[in-house]
Image (spheres, rainbow, N blue to C red):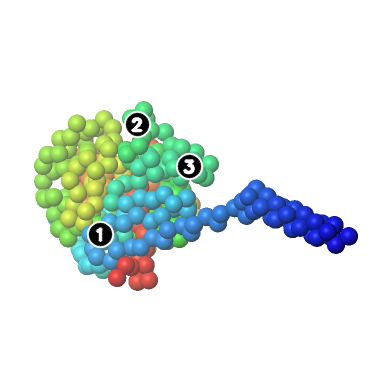
Amino acid sequence: MIKAIVATFIAGIFVGLTLLWLEYTYFIPVYNPKVPPPLPVSIRPCAAGQVFRDYLQDGSLGPEMVIIPAGRFQMGDIQGQGDSDERPVHWVSIERFAMGRYEVTFAEYDRFAMMTGAKKTYDQGWGRNNRPVINVSLADAYTYTEWLTRQTGHQYRLPMEAEWEYAARAKTTTQYWWGEDMGFYHANCDGCGSRWDNKKTAMVGSFAANSFSLYDMLGNVYEWTCSKYEKRYTGKEQSCLSKHNTDNLWVLRGGSWYSLPGYIRVSARFRKNLTHHDSTVGFRLVSILTMSQFNN
């Protein structure tokens, strides 16, 4: 009798251990999957001219951004050779901010479209990848910046008109950031001396950057701003207009591959409505900087 009890006890232990081994070997890995590691946190530099990229939610990197220093500049037609809407010339103070090193590319916009189901824009048969995205309306650009803000946890938007001119001038007072004259092969426009002139867009970064390390600020594609257009400067150039103000005109800057040299001057202004889009229009990003974001 005692032997039977001991044998039963030993058999029970053996069966129990066997069941535990089976559970830990086959069942626990199935029902207790590994916890994914947290997404990397973007650390932003603080020095002017430094480049950074924020992480998206899938761990990939967003567009390249450059730290633009704070400063004060004269905005408008300093030389007196432009249109009446480039006046009055006035002083503007700008806080430090980050700006897209390049115009937003097809590769960047197509990723947004694929992740959100938004419609991809037409490339005119010129190619996509690192060419600036074109045929984007202001509404499209606003939607992209809102998506990027959600993806990164950092605020992105379009540049205010004053921020755009400050960044394009890069501490210069001439008609173009490189000097008073158009010269040769500084940009892509109708008369800039490049192989893309009056034909199509160039790949971003095909020309030298200005002293703020920004490429293609003049020519290639018009760039949307978030500012309301007015026939004379009254202060609206230093603010953003909500996309819900559909009856207004917004400012575009920089000229395009199709523009004559006079229209890619740093002070030249253009305006379109919220839904306008064509093969000369793209956009560039701005991101707001806060002290808590800096890598000290």
Q: Which mark is residue 127?
A: 2
Toward the right, the furthest residue is 1
Cα gap from disc 3 to disc 1, whole angstroms: 29 Å
Q: Are marks 2 and 3 in contact (CB under 8 Å)?
A: no
In depth, the one of 48 and 19 nearer the eye is 19
Residue at coordinates 38% horizontally, 46% vertically from top-left? 272
Q: Which mark is residue 50?
A: 1
User: Which of 89 and 3 lies nearest the eye of the viewer?
Assistant: 3
In the rendered image, which residue does mark 3 sit on?
113
Q: Residues within 10 Å of mark 3 (few under 14, many from 20)?
A: some
* First-in-chain label (3 vs 1): 1
From the viewer's perspective, tell me whether residue 140 is left or right of residue 75.
right
User: Whole-Å distance between the Cαs marked 1 and 2?
Assistant: 30 Å
The amino acid type, in three-letter code, at marker 2 is: Gly
> Element at badge 2?
loop
Q: Amino acid at mark 3?
A: Ala
Question: Residue at 24% across / 43% down in the picture?
Answer: 205
Residue 281, x across and y down, in percent: 35, 42
Q: Are marks 1 and 2 in contact (CB under 8 Å)?
A: no
Instruction: Name the residue type under label 1.
Output: Gln
Q: Earlier in the sequence, mark 2 or mark 3?
A: 3
